[in-house]
Amino acid sequence: MENQGIASEKRKEKGKEIYDLSESDDDLPKDGIFHGNSFDDENNDTEEDIDLDLNNMDNTIDVSSSSTLRIHKNHPQSQIIGPTASGVKTRNQLQDGKRVIGTKWVFRNKRDERGTIIKNKARLVAQVKQSTAGIFISQDKYVKDILNKFDFRTIKPATTPIEAHKALGKDEEGEDVDVHLYRSMIGCLMYLTASRPDIMFAVCLCARFQVTPKISFHLEAFSDSDYAGDNHDRRSTSGGCQYLGRRLVSWQCKKQTIVAISSTEAEYVAAASCCGQVLWMQNQLFDYGFNFMNTDIHIDNESTICIVKNPVFHSKTKHIQIRHHFIRDCYDQRLINVVKVHTDDNVADLLTKGFDLARFNSLVVNIGMMNP
């Protein structure tokens, strides 16, 4: 007890010394938050009577092991949904008998070609339309967002997700593309397949080429003729069109200079004319560093294809002028290739004759002139 008293006196003296050092005019408290009755008058009269006892402090503090909840007895009226006398209800019960459309979080880990996680993604999924006809799943807004993201709003749409009879393959000599941009497109389209099963096959096929995607242009042509279409001299009309990639870049419509004695001969002459245009385009593109050898020419006549592939002249072809037979040499040198196409899919048919409204509109769409 005696030691505690001595320590107390020393603390008083020490506190007094500190107080005495601050009694100069420059160090006196100025008018402010500690001036007046708010602080000084309340504490100054008892400062000398304070007896600090450090032994009067607890070393430990008891903390409850169970969590405590803050309970508000008076809930704000503005946050209560519905009448207060109806009691507590769930969200589903508050919709007057209507079921609330649920949502869910979808979490995915994006990996690179080595299997390393490069990104964690999360999406809140819900995009459902209700009408008197039923409930429909739609991603219209998501489609618009994709087109805006990749600046595809001004691109002319295709009639089908992928071309028929044309499989994707490796192109070692093709131009490299931005692999991150390509993968981003594939990822967006994969998410779109949740409501678009019609593009599922095309998207999955493109997804197989994400390691080293290339830009591949493909040169192809279509040939057709109208046998004895001219009522005056019974001459046929040749039609042809050439595509670079999916874009129509050249087309021809010309009356033949000979009178064909069969539809096969008329088709053969038209194919030879189309072949000449293809050879010119191959030479032009070769100057720009593009080699399009073995270009496909689509023909809807089986007999014409057989004549092109058969190097032997016989009685059914000897009357055809020799200048039309150069197509055989082009086929032998693998400059071109002749491919069978169904008449309904031969877009060159639009350049040979007139059609009714339904067939005309179909050909206009297929040739790539307007939206379906």
Image: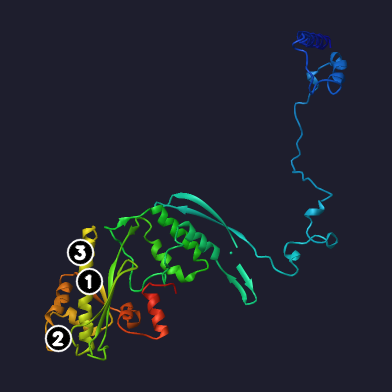
Front residue (pair 370, 296): 370
**122 vs 271, nearest the viewer:** 271
| Element class at badge 3 | helix
Q: N-terminal of the two: label 2 or label 3? A: 3
The amino acid on which the numbered mark 2 sits, given as a three-letter code, is Thr
Q: Secondary structure at mark 2?
A: loop
* Residue at 76% from the left image edge and 10% from the top image edge: 22
- Please, is residue 135 above or below residue 268 in the view? above
- What residue did someone put label 2 on? 317
Above or below: residue 28 compared with residue 337 = above
Residue 36: image x %, image y %?
85, 20
Q: Looking at the rendered structure, which numbered label has been put on residue 336?
A: none
* Mark 1 residue crowding within 10 angstroms, few (<14) / some (14–19) / many (20+): some
Name the amino acid type tagged 3. Asn
Residue 277's tag is 1
The quarter in which the N terminus is drawn is top right
Closer-to-camera residue (309/291): 291
User: Tag 1 or tag 2, which sits nearer the N-term?
Assistant: 1
Please give left or right for residue 94 compared with residue 344 in the image. Answer: right
Q: Position of residue 295 (x, y in %)?
A: 24, 69
- Position of residue 111 measured from the top left corner of the image (x, y, whole percent): 45, 53
Residue shown at the point (65%, 65%) measured from the top left: 101
Quadrant where the C terminus lies? bottom left
Q: CA distance from mark 3 to mark 1?
A: 10 Å
